[in-house]
Image (cartoon, helix red, strand yellow):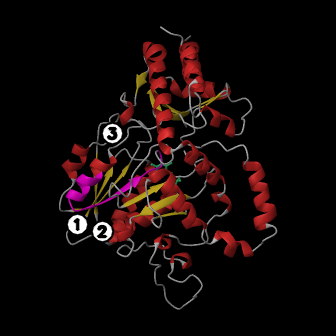
Amino acid sequence: MTDLLDTARALDAADPLGAHLDAFLDAPGVTAYLDGNSLGRPLRDIPEKLAAFVREDWGTRLIRSWDEQWMALPMELGDRIGRVALGAAAGQTVVADSTSVLIYKLLRAALGAAGEGRTELVMEAGNFPTDRFLAEGVAAEAGMTLRWLEPDPVRGVTIADVEAVVSERTALVSLSHVDYRSGALSDMPGITAAVHEAGALMMWDLCHSAGVIPTQLDAWGVDMAVGCTYKYLNGGPGSPAFAYLRHDLQGLLRQPIQGWWSAADIFAMGPEYAPSGDIRQLLSGTPPVTSMLAMQGMLDLIEQATIDGVRAKSSSLTDLAVRGYDEVLAPLGVRLLSPRDPDLRGSHVTIGHPDFREVTQRLWADGIIPDFRFPDGIRLGLSPLSTSHVETITGILAVRDALESHGR
Ligand SMILES: *Cc1c(COP(=O)(O)O)cnc(C)c1O
């Protein structure tokens, strides 16, 4: 058995993206940050960029900055995310609100446009709580039936699972691309095609894949998508989300939070609302400009590394985590709760053990930061541009040590 740390060092030495590790701010006392899937790290130049923004763009240009740059920012940034990470041509993606609010807008818009007899919304029973709660509320509001999909919790949703529930009654299917618990990666083109075959619309939640798993939203015919920017796009706590709405649906769907920013002419200040004909129709009110700053540097970095390069490193990191699991954690009775096949996995690996709540507390106290997910899972989130192979194995070995000393 080669030493795991030696293997990790060799992989880091050969890592074509290794130089980017230094682009992130140091976190004193943290030896392994394994939660970039929940909150990405800030880039090293963020403090200076924020200060310059306050001094110049806001402090000196004052309200002139709206005309000079901020009015167009939600659309420009959306186009950049689309180009760098999503496989989406310009004019179909905006940055706004939170993921939860954008899910609400798109679900409501899709159900509002459903054809005669299409009365069902399909959602996975294990989806992230906000997605499920919103679907419940929107189905009730629209007088529709919510149909739950119950896939294998480790393997995630398959095409067959979807084919088994869609019918001529389905209006919309809404799923996560990468499962927030298991990390299971769904077959986006295959599932989207199956949903279209049934005559329904497809919406993808990209929170755990945007910026780490390449997609081809246009080529795969995806209708709608939403995602976070504070996970693998490192936009900072509460940075606004993005929404994608396919070009040819933009004239057909109406989102429910119709504000002045989604109106055909923002400054007409007219008596009645008419929606903008372009992607701006998904906005509602004044965008959070300050919170759109940090993600811009990360998009530059992903563009340099390329999304395919980021994905390759992600697979290398999760492969090593699974290998470390096999060698030192499986013998201690730890369960692997993520798919073994790297092609079926996003960028985090989840492991389970009844002692993990206490183990996580010990790890955090020692500067090893994964996250704990009820009932007994630890997620090792491996954000490729900011995480090394050595950091990954340091985390695995620390879980082993904490588990062994906890058992004593
Ligand atoms: C992180 C995450 C969210 C978060 O939604 P917010 O509105 O930003 O709190 C939603 N859905 C999924 C699948 C997530 O992973």
Q: What residue is shown at x 54% (from left), y 84% (from top)?
A: 265
Q: Is residue 195 magenta?
A: yes
Q: Nearer the viewer, residue 91 or 365?
A: 91
Q: Disc 3 residue type?
A: Gly
Return the residue at label 2.
143
Whether the residue carrying mark 2 lies under 8 Å from ligand 1 is answered with no
Which numbered disc, 1 or 2, marks the residue closer to the eye?
Answer: 1
Closer to the chain start, of discs 2 and 3, is 2
Q: Is residue 228 above or below residue 342?
A: below
Q: Is residue 405 above or below residue 190?
A: above
Q: CA distance from mark 2 to mark 3?
A: 28 Å
Q: Relative to residue 361, is residue 165 drawn left or right?
A: left
**SS for callout 2:** loop
Return the residue at label 3.
156
Where is residue 135, by image quadrant? bottom left
Q: What residue is shown at x 46% (from left), y 74% (from top)?
A: 278
Whether the residue carrying mark 3 lies under 8 Å from ligand 1 is answered with no
Q: Where's residue 300, x and y in %?
A: 61, 50
Q: Alpha-carbon neighbours of circle 3 within 10 Å: few (<14), some, or many (≥20)?
A: many
Q: Where's residue 164, x and y in %?
A: 19, 48
**SS for callout 1:** loop
Q: Disc 2 residue type?
A: Gly
Residue segment shown in magenta: 192-208
Q: Where's residue 281, x and y in %?
A: 47, 74
Q: Is residue 34 visible?
A: yes
Q: Disc 1 residue type?
A: Arg
Q: What residue is shown at x 40% (from left), y 25% (from top)?
A: 336
**SS for callout 3:** loop
In the image as oriented, which residue stretches furthest toward the bottom? 271
Q: Which mark, residue 118?
A: 1
